[in-house]
Amino acid sequence: MESSDEEDVGKHRVHLRPITLRNAAPVTLHLLPCEIPVNRPAPVGRFFTSAIRQGPDGLEVSFRGRSLRGEEVEVPPGLVGYVMMMEEKGKVLVGKQDFSEGSEHDEEQEEQELVEPPEALERDFDRFIGASASFSRFTLWGLETIPGPDAKVRAALTWPSLAAAIHAPVLED
């Protein structure tokens, strides 16, 4: 029997707001080896980032009394990372959008506000996401040790180059 979470996943459709990718401000990211069940701003710069120090084996910091070890990880060349946020349910950006580069309607699109959606777009299973920030590197933290080369995030970052190699044309001899 499926849980209600699994049932909900099958019923959602996620739509990306491409215009948000253009205006995503760069941020500093930390990928922690834990879950923090809070979703609100926190004074990370004041209490966490300021405590990071360079140790003999990489970066070191303490979080809630636990020792973390970390290192900077670069996003693969030619790619950009985005922090995505789910829009509030029932609020969508309305109006026809032209996502081509250099559109003459760019300023007009950027000034559009969130308004109540027209009934045709109002579906329980539709979700809208947009980029709230961008990054080209992040700090990967491990509990007591630096995450090794077999860390899942490292495997994910090698996928774009692997996919490009797999799909590259094969030259005949």
Image: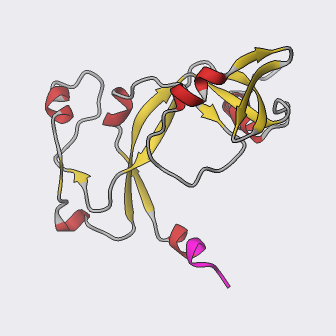
Q: Image quarter for residue 140?
A: top right
Closer to us: 155 or 113? 113
Residue 80 shows in this picture: no
Q: Is 4 in the magenta?
A: yes
Closer to us: 92 or 68? 68
User: x and y percent of residue 173 in the render?
Assistant: 83, 20
Q: Which residues are magenta?
A: 1-6
What is the tally of numbered marks visible in this picture?
Answer: 0
Q: Is residue 128 left or right of residue 172?
A: left
Closer to us: 165 or 148? 148
Residue at the limit of the structure toward the front, as seen here: 65
Q: Is residue 130 above or below residue 56?
A: below
Q: Is residue 135 above or below residue 97?
A: above
Q: Is 39 in the magenta?
A: no
Residue at the limit of the structure toward the bottom, as seen here: 1
User: x and y percent of residue 77 in the render?
Assistant: 61, 18
Q: Is residue 83 left or right of residue 125?
A: right
* x 68%, y 39%: residue: 32
* x 60%, y 50%: residue: 36
Q: Image quarter for residue 24?
A: top left
User: x and y percent of residue 20 in the render?
Assistant: 34, 35
Residue 103 shows in this picture: yes
Q: Quadrant of the N terminus?
A: bottom right
Q: Image quarter for residue 90?
A: bottom left
User: x and y percent of residue 147 in the render?
Assistant: 81, 33
